[in-house]
Image (cartoon, grey):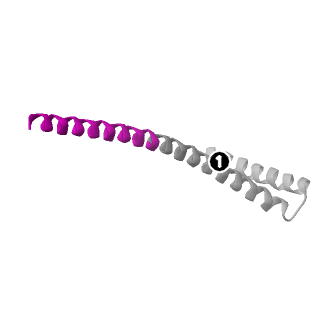
Amino acid sequence: MREDIWNDIYILISMYEKAERECETVRKELQRKEEMMEEYREQIKELERQIDSLKLKNAFLSTSGDEEAKGKIDSLIREIDRCIALLEG
């Protein structure tokens, strides 16, 4: 009888230790997935910035050549500079 109780206790301890190891494995996997998810978020942000940049570039280039697009950008910069000067003055 006593031996059966001790066997049951050893079995329970063994099951507990196995569950603990499995839990630790799952924790590590979860941490790894969270790190990957953060990396993917950063990649998405960078790609969105690139898309915005390309959209802006294409908006200027779709109706004109490189020189004309540069002229439009320069004009916009001068306009922004004038606005800043007005705000400061």
Where on the picture, by quarter, is residue 88? top right
Classify 10 Å Cα crowding around label 1: few (below 14), some (14-19), many (20 and above).
few
Where on the picture, by quarter, is residue 30? top left
Which residue is located at x 13 percent, y 34 percent? 3
Q: Secondary structure at mark 1?
A: helix
The residue segment tinted magenta is 1-30
- Residue 19 colored magenta? yes
Which residue is located at x 13 percent, y 38 percent? 5
User: Horizontal and vertical percent for residue 36?
Assistant: 54, 44
Q: In this figure, which residue is indicated by the disc labeled 1?
A: 46
User: Horizontal and vertical percent for residue 43?
Assistant: 62, 47
Which residue is located at x 58 percent, y 48 percent? 40
Secondary structure of the magenta portion, mostly? helix
Under mark 1, the amino acid is Glu
User: Horizontal and vertical percent for residue 68?
Assistant: 89, 57
Q: Is residue 64 above or below residue 10?
A: below
Residue lying at the far left in this picture: please name it.
Answer: 1
Which residue is located at x 76 percent, y 53 percent? 76
For this rendering, which residue is in front, 73 or 33?
33
Q: Is residue 82 left or right of residue 34?
A: right
